[in-house]
Amino acid sequence: MNIKKYLLLLLMHAVGLTLSAQPDVVTARLDRLPTIIEMPYSEAVQGCIDRYTQEPLKSRVGVMLGLMNSYMSYFEEALEANNLPLELRYLPVVLSRLDAGKKTGDAAGLWQIGVREAQINGLEVNSLVDERLDPVRSTEMAAERLRKLYTSLGDWSLTLAAYKGGESTVQKAVARAGNQRDFWRIYAYLPAETRAIVPEFIAANYIMTYYCEYGIFPSDGTLPRETDTVRVKQRVALEQVEAVCEVPLATLKELNPQYRTGLVPGGYALRLPEGKVVNFIRNEADVYAFQADKYLTQRTTVVVPKTQAAVKRRTPVRRKSRGRRRRR
């Protein structure tokens, strides 16, 4: 990028303006993307690109670019393990705007997974733990689901639609369209939210590649790029980890969104900035002991006093003895 264009982008970013591109320019740029999944230009795609390049979503794109530095390795490792196209790493941009704690109805997490679906596929969802919010576990499950859907449907656009709306929804649309298996031919037969995912996915790949052309700049991510996990031996509160290991509570919550109440059950993994894992291991006993009475208030055993009714039942009743009648 030459210096004049860079200065123009800075100026436009400062005043909130947006560079626009003609349809033929957008089409050419889409064609240059190194993707397996088909990414054709359409008015629906252009509409999605326009939303990404205008406020309020434009500012979020900068945030998402920063977050991708932290999430990219999780996404690409899971996709590679399932032999899936790497462009699917931008699907969470569409589904959750890369908000790991996002909840929409029954769905939650980066990949917007429902409760029943999560439990069927081995993710834990209870009052303390929601693994749909775990970036690593949810990504692994989402990749496996995408692989199974593609094996069944044989087309990536249909697979994306099925991920959003369910395979049965796609199969019904195929039947109504005269057994056409082209996404754009069954487009009108799909529910609005289901058919929107493909144009949005194309636009997400576009804007996450050509963001500079629209005066969008990555923000500094709040998540550390390098992290590691340690398995805790007993229940621990994130506040205890914060105090002893000197990791900001906000960072701990962002790295461990699956722990709903901020309590990590014994035997579970705690994600920390890479440089803090050794610190935790060396001071583990101190972490568990730090103000335990304050943060770990659940009791493991209690002594229950006897109720009055129980006392009465167990107290022997004295019966008056009847003396023998004297004979006259």
Image (cartoon, grey):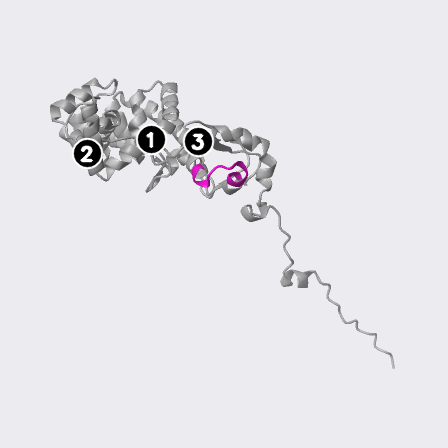
What residue type is disc 2 on? Answer: Met
What residue type is disc 3 on? Answer: Gly
Residue that carries the numbered disc 1 in the rendered image: 66
Quarter the C terminus occupies: bottom right
Q: Where does residue 46 sit, x and y in percent of width and height?
A: 16, 30
Identify the residue at image location x=57%, y=45%: 291
The quarter of the displayed image where residue 323 is located? bottom right
Element marked by disc 1: helix
Q: Nearer the viewer, residue 34 or 328?
A: 34
> Alpha-carbon neighbours of circle 1 within 10 Å: few (<14), some, or many (≥20)?
some
Q: Nearer the viewer, mark 2 or mark 3?
A: 2
Q: CA distance from mark 2 to mark 3?
A: 48 Å
Q: Is residue 45 left or right of residue 237?
A: left
Residue that carries the numbered disc 3 in the rendered image: 122
Q: CA distance from mark 3 to mark 1?
A: 30 Å
Mark 2 and mark 3 lie on one chain; the one further toward the N terminus is 2
